[in-house]
Amino acid sequence: MVALPFVRIPVAQALRFTVPAAAMLLAACAVGPNFKAPAPPAVSSYTPHPVAATAATPGVAAGSAQHFDSGADIPGDWWTLFHCAPLDALIKQALAHNPDLKAAQAALRVAHENMLAQRGAFFPSVSANLSASRQRQAGSLAPVPDSNAFLYNLYTPQLSISYTPDVFGANRRSVESLKAQEQSARFQMIAAWNTLASNVAVAAIQLAALQAQIDATRQLVDENTKMLDILRYQFAKGYASRVDLAAQESQLAQTEATLPPLEKQLAQQRDLLAVLAGRFPSQAAGDQITLDSLHLPEALPLSLPSALVAQRPDVRQAQANLHAASAEVGVATAARLPNLTLTADTGSTSLEFSKLFTGGTGFWDMAAGITAPIFEGGTLLHQQRAAKAAFVEADEQYRSTVLAAFQNVADTLVALDQDAKALQSAAKAEQAAKLTLDLTEHQLKAGYASNLQWLTAEQTWQQARITLVQAQANRFADTAALYQALGGGWWHHSDLSTQ
């Protein structure tokens, strides 16, 4: 960088200089590209074959048909559509106390304050200084004060003003970049809010499913224990073989062995829910959520593809990052251009503190300087090229985020459709397995079926019950996933949409 020397100029000339400079500043254009938000994708659907409604399974929990309302809005508190008070309380607790969400909110405040700090560059910098010194001049030199004293005190209060006009828009682009970074932090916080609500809902559903599987397994253990008692009696009377007794003992042991893994998963899920809600595992909520306490929403909103990019917080965050990268190109470009600085000083100097600001003690000066880069070893050039490459990187990351968002919605729609079909099949399989078990049990008691046949029928029913519970849980979980995939309705919360 080379700096031209400062030149002192009279007040009248300074005014004639600063007024046109200010006018030039106001009329100047910021260098670098002006950001324009990307257009929404030109697609009309999420899947090759849109799904109008899902299959229904009457008489089974979570068996209602779901239909999609194209263009409908997403409720802000979508989880209330499950009509489960304990779930509502859990999500409310998590949104109020989750530390990760609070950290994201603090990051937003950091970004906001950084943006406000940068805006200070638009204004002059004013500083005050007061110096006091005691000096002794060498006798071989003429005395400096007009009193011819060689030993004296000197008091100098001074006010300094410095201003750098934003001729090429470096400050404006910097503020623009920081505003975009603030938006990025805001949508990152909204994404954390949206993900947290969905994670709590899915974790609660999984907890309910595990509890249902444990209840079913315990019931099977009881039934197997009763059958074992019957076989032991029959074996003692000579009506059953040792092979039948050993097979039943094995079946009971295998069924009991499935309980500890389920109990472990249940405990871990409770711990997860407690931590998501900002509690310690020992402070887990006591309210029990069951699959029967959940209501499956039958009318599901489906945002238009053109609206998805405005609703998804991750897409909006990627767009803000793209905007920030665009502004940084302007900052790097402006760094290669001349920089104008205006300074002014005024104050008073006196040998006595009491005579400060009296006649003859005042002084002032005004100056202007231009600093222009001439040789930087390619630093500024390559920084500008790096900024342009970062803009291309951010643009591709935005495209990738949009594609991932559409994939997320498409996958969820397919999952909902297949979940309904899977539940339909699981319900039929469970009903058939239960009927087979009942008939086999009657035949066994009448002597027309073997114990092995009954064991096989019981094992089939056990697996069918667990499969049915998992199919029910999948419908609830994927319904919650759809609300998250469509943006979560954050725009209905004033504390999120206006921050």
Image (cartoon, rainbow, N blue to C red):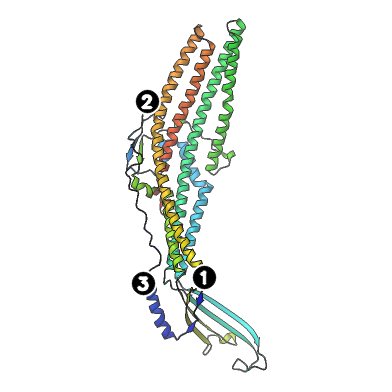
Q: Are marks 2 and 1 in contact (CB under 8 Å)?
A: no
First of labels 2, 1 by sequence position: 2
Task: Identify the residue at image location x=42%, y=33%.
Answer: 475
Q: Secondary structure at mark 3?
A: helix
First of labels 3, 1 by sequence position: 3
In this view, the residue farthest toward the top is: 238
> Do we see residue 288 in this rendering?
no
Q: Secondary structure at mark 2?
A: loop
> Do we see residue 398 in this rendering?
yes
Task: Identify the residue at image location x=52%, y=29%.
Answer: 211
Q: Does residue 362 appear left or right of residue 67 in this picture?
A: right
Tell me residue 8's x, y (percent): 48, 85
Q: Which labelled disc corresponds to residue 58?
A: 2
Mark 2 packing: few (<14 Cα in 10 Å), some, or many (20+)?
few
Compared with residue 418, is residue 171 higher up or lower down, i.e. above or below?
Answer: below
Compared with residue 362, is residue 214 higher up or lower down, i.e. above or below?
Answer: above
User: Which residue type carries mark 3?
Assistant: Ala
Quarter of the C terminus within the rendering: bottom left
User: Which residue type carries mark 2?
Assistant: Pro
Disc 3 vs disc 2: which is toward the camera? 3
Q: Secondary structure at mark 1?
A: loop
Q: Which residue is mark 1?
A: 376
Q: Quadrant of residue 194?
A: top left
User: Which residue type carries mark 1?
Assistant: Glu
First of labels 3, 2 by sequence position: 3
Q: Which residue is mark 3?
A: 27
Task: Identify the residue at image location x=54%, y=40%.
Answer: 274
Tell me residue 279's x, y (percent): 56, 43
